[in-house]
Image (cartoon, rainbow, N blue to C red):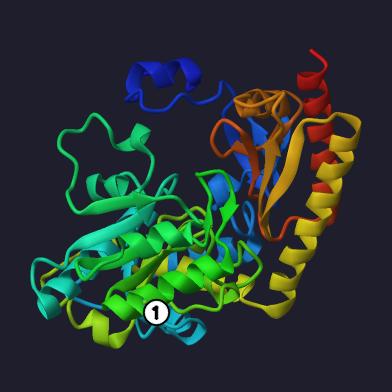
Amino acid sequence: MSSTPLNRDLFDQVMVPNYAPASNIPVRGEGSRVWDQEGREYIDFAGGIAVTSVGHAHPQMLATLQDQGSKVWHLSNFMTNEPALKLAQQLTDATFAERVFLCSSGAEANEAAFKLARRYAFDKFGPDKHEIIAFHQGFHGRTLFTVNVGGQPKYSDGFGPKIVGITHLPYNDIAALEAAVSDKTCAIVMEPLQGEGGIIAADPAFAQKARELCDKYQALLVIDEVQTGVGRLGSLYAYQQLGITPDIMSSAKGLGNGFPVAAMLTTKAIATHMGVGTHGSTYGGNPLASAIASKVLDLINQPQVLADVNAKFERFKTGLEAINAKYPFMHEVRGRGLLIGAALNEDYLGRAGDFLSAATEVGLMVLVAGPDVVRFAPSLLIPDADIDAGLALFEQAVAKVTQT
């Protein structure tokens, strides 16, 4: 084996260049703290892009990994397994759903959701009812189908002909939605809060109108909760805050705390249209992933934990507004729970990446949501002391950007 140093330079020699990672390489984490190869400490406000929902190296997660890892890691889908059954039961007990399809990523969960929506319409109404309505700036994954449903051409252009029958509308525009839905519509696909699109929350009236139009035109409402689910917005799933019930929902990211696991949830009646052989996932529902996701739900789906998520939002909001009072850099705080966006003011539009870089330099990991929004998505269990310490570091970063 080569003795080449495992550093950033090696990435350029061995990896496909679809990413441009930072020069520092984290090697260890505990709670909401991370250390890199040089021993430098960071406070983690990024959460692996809203993934590490219970933080790094949580002792109960480690115990679950060791316990299930000593039993069985994987079985083919010719067999079921106890952890998968337990996880599916937890998800159906806690949501609208009656049936669950387990897979390995948010893109897989959405791919299954979109295929099921079209299959349901095909079986019940014929091939003409295949059109999907989605929204500008939406993000649903990187497979060819999901990137076409997503409303960001920068991700879908350049891969040959687009998948037909997909219409993109302005998010939160009720009039545009009413004008677009027809008898050919098989599904409306929406995020309760657009994460990659800038931390833009759905207006409840908009979400309710989507539900009404689906009922009127016998279409399915597909809710993408890959980023917003599993407690991220202060309820187990964000649809529960909007007063609507989806027909199909996707869940991933925080469901596995970093272990690749995802789920598509739906009703019994709709699920019957995805019969034996119509879809599959080699790793989906394997015992190891299922056991980990089950423990994540145990830790997060508790009233006090969810209440704390909402309280932590207020702590973030107050802290960001205090920074802004000293160094005006944003025009508003967006989001709910622990999916938070600092929307930059007109003086700093396009410079979210500069704030990210400055934060990294002072020992804080943050995200962006497009060029104009700095995004924060830490562990749902992040201690208040780490929030305060991280915001103090962010103030240093903001000062650096705004004073140079």
Q: Position of residue 35 (x, y in %)?
A: 67, 35
Q: Write the residue at 34% across / 61% down.
A: 179
Q: Nearer the viewer, residue 189 or 15?
A: 189
Q: Position of residue 358 (x, y in %)?
A: 71, 23
Specify the amino acid type for callout 1.
Answer: Ala
Q: Write the residue at 31% across / 73% down.
A: 220
Q: Which residue is mark 1?
A: 88
In which quadrant of the rendered image does the N terminus lie? top left
Q: Position of residue 185 (x, y in %)?
A: 24, 66
Task: Report crowding for label 1: few under 14, some 14 to 19, many 20 or more residues within 10 A (C-alpha).
Answer: many
Q: Is residue 181 above or below residue 328?
A: below
Q: Is residue 184 visible?
A: yes
Q: Write the residue at 38% across / 51% down.
A: 169
Find residue 296 and report its image quarter: bottom right
Q: Nearer the viewer, residue 222 or 281?
A: 222
Find residue 202 and report its image quarter: bottom right
Q: Is residue 187 left or right of residue 5?
A: left
Check the image and name the residue furthest to the top: 404
In which quadrant of the rendered image does the C terminus lie? top right
Label 1's element? helix
Q: Nearer the viewer, residue 130 or 57?
A: 130
Q: Is residue 132 left or right of residue 229?
A: left
Find residue 222 and report its image quarter: bottom left
Q: Is residue 67 visible?
A: no
Q: Write the residue at 53% across / 49% down.
A: 195
Q: Is residue 95 above or below residue 319?
A: below
Count how many numbered circles sit on residues in the image. Answer: 1
Q: Is residue 76 above or below residue 199?
A: below
